[in-house]
Image: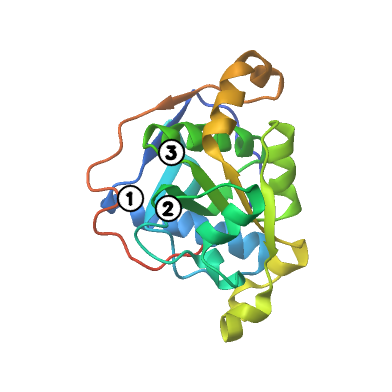
């Protein structure tokens, strides 16, 4: 994961609204994500996660990310591992991990740095409500630091070795210069921690977000192949 951003800051226009993209909105979010990665890394993204979520401000897209459920398909980040994600995560944490409750987050793009932390908080709230437990992602130092500033624990599971991607590695431009790692953590523990320190989040500039109902058919007919970096 990284946080591609616009070279210009976006003025505050009103409350942020979070929702899952409808099929008709996918093209907008895919374009937004691809432009962010091209700008930040010189990357050429052409595949996206099956579920895409966005943060809008007065109908203007401010941030986006994608989610893939491990129960549905192999995760992109499993290409960096020698074993299934549930086995690697279970070994790292010393617990039994149910693959059906694992999600991979990727495709993260924002217009400004300040949106990363509220994006993480709202994503965790959404996934916990769906009874998911384990969050996995491939993250650069910047995103790992954002988790730490929120007081959330995520464990390194493996280096993201571009050699494992073969010829596809060239699509990622400068991304691997940011030392990405495969990470994983317990969202239930993270959510309890966030609720316990809700007042402190204001001091961390975690802005309030209006959560809208998921748009109709937001992930039923989406493409199956996805890109897992955030």
Q: Dot 1 corresponds to which residue?
A: 25
**Secondary structure beneath disc 2?**
helix
Residue 92 vertical placement versus 159 (above, below): above
Q: Dot 3 corresponds to which residue?
A: 127
**Secondary structure beneath disc 1?**
helix
Task: Please report whichever mark, 3 or 1, sits nearer to the chain's N-terminal start.
Answer: 1
Nearer the viewer's eye, disc 3 or disc 1? 3
Q: Residue furthest bottom?
A: 167
Q: Pick the residue in front: 207 or 196.
A: 196
> Residue, x 57% and y 53% (percent of image)?
90
Q: Pick the residue in front: 11 or 93.
A: 93
The N terminus lies in quadrant: bottom right
In 3D space, how far apart are the residues under numbered discs 3 and 1 (Cα atoms)? 21 Å
Residue 156 vertical placement versus 206 (above, below): below
What crowding class fits label 1: few (fewer than 14 Cα within 10 Å), some (14-19), or many (20 or more)?
some
Q: Taking 80 as reference, is 64 left or right? A: left
Q: Taking 29 as reference, is 21 left or right? A: left
What crowding class fits label 3: few (fewer than 14 Cα within 10 Å), some (14-19), or many (20 or more)?
many
Is the C-beta separation of discs 2 and 1 under 8 Å? Answer: yes
Q: At which x and y percent is residue 156?
A: 70, 54
Q: Taking 186 as reference, is 156 left or right? A: right
In 3D space, how far apart are the residues under numbered discs 2 and 3 (Cα atoms)? 19 Å
**Secondary structure beneath disc 3?**
helix
Q: At which x and y percent is residue 151?
A: 70, 31
**Residue 40 at least partly seen:** yes
Q: Dot 2 corresponds to which residue?
A: 29
């Amino acid at each position: 994961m990284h946080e591609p951003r616009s070279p210009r800051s976006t003025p505050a226009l009103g409350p942020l609204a979070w929702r899952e993209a409808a099929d008709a909105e996918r093209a907008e979010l895919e374009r937004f994500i691809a432009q962010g990665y091209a700008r930040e890394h010189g990357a050429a993204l052409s595949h996206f996660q099956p579920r895409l979520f966005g943060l809008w401000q007065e109908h203007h897209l401010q941030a986006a990310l994608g989610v893939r459920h491990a129960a549905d398909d192999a995760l992109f980040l499993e290409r960096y591992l020698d074993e299934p994600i549930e086995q690697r995560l279970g070994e790292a944490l010393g617990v039994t991990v149910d693959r059906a409750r694992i999600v991979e987050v990727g495709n993260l793009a924002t217009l400004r740095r300040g949106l990363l932390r509220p994006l993480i908080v709202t994503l965790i709230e959404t996934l916990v409500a769906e009874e998911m437990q384990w969050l996995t992602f491939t993250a650069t130092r910047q995103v790992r630091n954002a988790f730490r500033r929120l007081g959330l624990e995520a464990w390194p599971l493996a280096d993201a070795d571009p050699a494992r991607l073969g010829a596809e590695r060239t699509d990622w431009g400068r991304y691997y210069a940011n030392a990405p790692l495969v990470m994983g953590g317990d969202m239930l523990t993270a959510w309890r921690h966030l609720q316990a320190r809700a007042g402190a989040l204001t001091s961390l500039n975690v802005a309030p977000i209006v959560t809208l109902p998921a748009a109709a058919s937001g992930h039923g007919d989406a493409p199956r192949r996805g890109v897992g970096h955030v």
